[in-house]
Amino acid sequence: MTHALIVDDDVDSVATLQELIASEKFTVSVAHTLRDARRHIALQQPDVVLLDLQLPDGNGMELFQDPQLVANSEVVLITGHASLDTSIQALRLGAADYLVKPINITQLQGVLSRVMKPAALQAEVSELNANLAQSGHFGLLWGRTQPMQRIYEQISRVAGTSVSVFINGESGTGKELVAQTVHDLSRRRKKPFLAVNCGAISPNLIESEIFGHEKGAFTGADKQHEGFFERASGGTLFLDELTEMPMELQVKLLRVLETGRFMRVGSTTTLDADVRVIAASNRPLLQAVQAGKLREDLLYRLNVFPIEMPPLRDRLDDVPLLADHFLRQIAAKEGKNKRFTAKALAQLQTYHWPGNVRELRNAVQRAYVMAAGDIVDEQWLPKGEGADVQATAASAAAVTSFGAASGAPAPAPAVPTVVAASGESSGPSITMPLGSSMAQVEKAFILATLQHYKHHKEQTAAVLGISLKTLYNRLKEYAAEDATAADKAAQ
């Protein structure tokens, strides 16, 4: 039978907690001091330790100094208040979860249902790392380069905890795959993993989709609807493109994260939210806060453990591995094996990949379809269309850095210039004046790409590596900015 140890000096709290844990078919022992806790651990190694931080003879964190405890027992902190500093410290030492007093029965039951020995989780991670050199992948993620090794290390560290994760990176870098891998290596793996693109849901429906609604809550609500928080109960909810979520809903999300409870639209009954939330955005987070797209308090609530995804251009040595992986996937679906020539793989490594891994996958699929035989050569692969933009951006960054170091003033931002570049392997490019903000560069690049593809929005979104909904949102923002500027000019 699974054994639990409660380490807490609050007699009344311990009595209630002991009864609740015993009702879940656990054997339970109790220690009121660190000294008693060490004695109990020596007599019988617990499967789970519910540990209060404030004890008569010291801080509960001192128990983490016992390597046997860290390896063989899941440690859950119980405290009167959960702080960000304590959360980070607990993560570093190896705690798996939090329970805030007064203990919520549903949350306690969820924690007890997920008890796993830390050594078992670590063994899985060790096996993935051992196979990485041969297989080239870690869970759902592919790549052997140093930037990806860093991502794997971060995933290994955070997966076994309940800490909130915020994944940041350009579109197409694999943020959802990171979230899925974190879930697959966590104690919540047997429960659902739900991915929600906040930019793909109508602002009028997103609250209902996330929290659910009661029958008759609004016109068209002809039956009760379970939202994502209910459907992901016990598991992981991945909120992609969080900066596209309306600000008024971000307030409600923050409240749910702080209290662990929510209400369906049209209901007065609160429900428990036993869900781990992982968020992601393709916008620079501080820039999103400054632009009014993300609440600062929500950012700091979710960004306990940040993961920054590298763009594909920063790990070009992974391109052949990824391309072969995608080619095998396509061949398995289509029923005909094909292979790249060495020259084709070399050409793929010279391209800038503005759409990142998603663009590479699409390029491989197109090349597979166009290859007449079993060999995929370089004919239908990208030939460096992004090189001009990359060189321009690199030169601009270098000159801007020099200007800042020398104290030279930066020129005022101006409208971009679209240049029709000559040469078979180059397409149109844009140039931006030094001193332009990242938001101005993004706006200029999106509008220039839209113009180049004759305002075909689906094709523009695909080339940029963003969702169609995100493109529409950006265009709506730009129209509002232009209207505001025109009004000011007219005054």
Image (cartoon, rainbow, N blue to C red):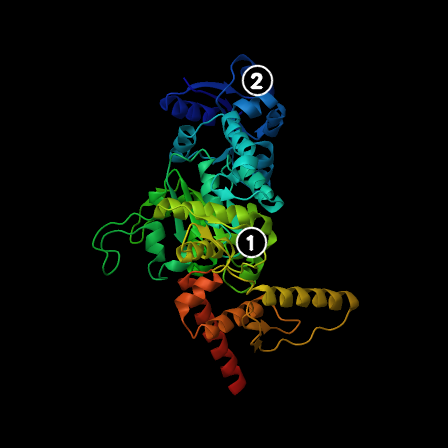
Element marked by disc 2: helix
Name which residue lies at 77% across and 65% down: 405
Residue in front for this viewpoint, 404 or 77: 404
Instruction: Give the quarter of the figure containing the N terminus.
Output: top left
Label 2 CA crowd tier, 10 Å (few <14, some 14–19, many 20+): few
Q: Where is residue 30 in the image (x, y as percent from the top left)?
A: 49, 19
Query: Can residue 257 be seen in the rendering of this structure?
Result: no
Q: List the residue tagged with mark 1.
A: 343
Query: Is the residue 309 above or below the residue 455 in the image?
Result: above
- Find residue 410 and report its horizontal and vertical position in percent: 70, 73
Disc 1 marks which amino acid? Lys
Residue 393 as seen in the image, left or right of residue 344: right
For residue 200, what is the image quadrant?
A: bottom left
Q: Where is residue 227 in the image (x, y as percent from the top left)?
A: 33, 49
Residue 111 point in image, percent of width and height: 43, 31
Q: Is residue 325 above or below residue 424?
A: above
- Residue bearing mark 2: 36
Q: Is residue 217 above or below residue 49?
A: below
